[in-house]
Image (cartoon, rainbow, N blue to C red):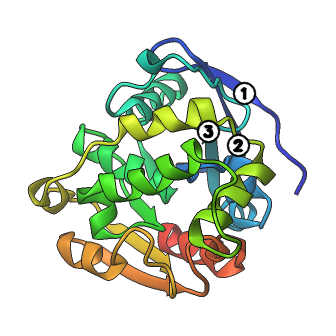
Amino acid sequence: MTNPALHHFAGFDGADLVWREVGEGRAIVLLHGFFSDAVTNWIKYGHAAAIAASGFRVIMPDLRAHGDSAKPHDPAAYPPDALAKDGFALIDYLGLTDYDLGGYSLGGRTTARMLALGATPRRVVIAGMGYDGLTSTGTRGDFFRNILTNPGSFARGTPEWLAEAFLKTSGGDPRALVHILDTFVNMTATEIAAIAQPVLVLAGADDFDNGSAEALAQALPHATHVVVPGNHMSAVVKPELGEAIAGFLAG
């Protein structure tokens, strides 16, 4: 699939943010992971096409500090829950009232935060995310802060080295991305248990980067836990990821 057209909207603070979309039908807003963008996470490996083929309008923003969206260096542009606030700005801009919502990794965490802050999608996808990744964000935050502030210092093949390699291939801006870590807000068990929508909890069989996806599914009142091949990074390239999302949304 060629890259779909770029559309602009204003983030919660007026920042120039963008989204792409494919397909027609019921809207599903999908949020990508850290260091990534909509094209890499959803379009490049066919996931958006698979979901669109099931009758959906797939809306995919580039998060603040990522992709073609604004990458401010001012810490003031990254208050707690900034990405969730941007998500609400997009939903408001598009006038979505009956929609689905989901994301991968950072996008999954942002989806959960939007739910805690009052988002009302019909169905939810939280992928590449476990229970600890929602309740103890500092662990993952410290991992990425180390990568962003100590470039070139990691032994080949380590998780840090692999993440830094992905950052380089994505052309990420470390000075902007490090501030994303300041937007993380820990969720409580009560907030997670209060998510009333049907939720697809989806993760690679070898993905434990954000804790246990199974534990997250057990903590949610209406969750379906699906395992796809791969680890946190490789699951994104597997067609099973998009197929699982399309199947859940169309079910």
Image coordinates for residue 149, horizontal then vertical, percent: 55, 42
Residue 52 in view in this figure: yes
Residue 23 in view in this figure: no
The residue beneath circle 1 is 7
Image coordinates for residue 111, horizontal then vertical, percent: 39, 49
The residue beneath circle 3 is 61
Is mark 1 in CB contact (under 8 Å) with mark 2? yes
Q: Quadrant of residue 222?
A: bottom left
Is 167 situated left or right of 138 in this image? right
Mark 2 or mark 3: name the one nearer the start of the chain: 2
Residue 121's place in the image compared with 88, above or below, is below
Q: Distance of mark 2 from mark 3, alpha carbons?
A: 8 Å
Callout 3 secondary element? strand
Question: Which amino acid type is marked by label 2?
Answer: Glu
Q: Quadrant of residue 159?
A: bottom right
Residue at point 31% right, 45% down?
113
Is 30 situated left or right of 81 in this image? right
The residue beneath circle 2 is 21
Question: Which amino acid type is marked by label 1?
Answer: His
Q: Quadrant of the N terminus?
A: bottom right
Residue at point 58% right, 30% down?
176
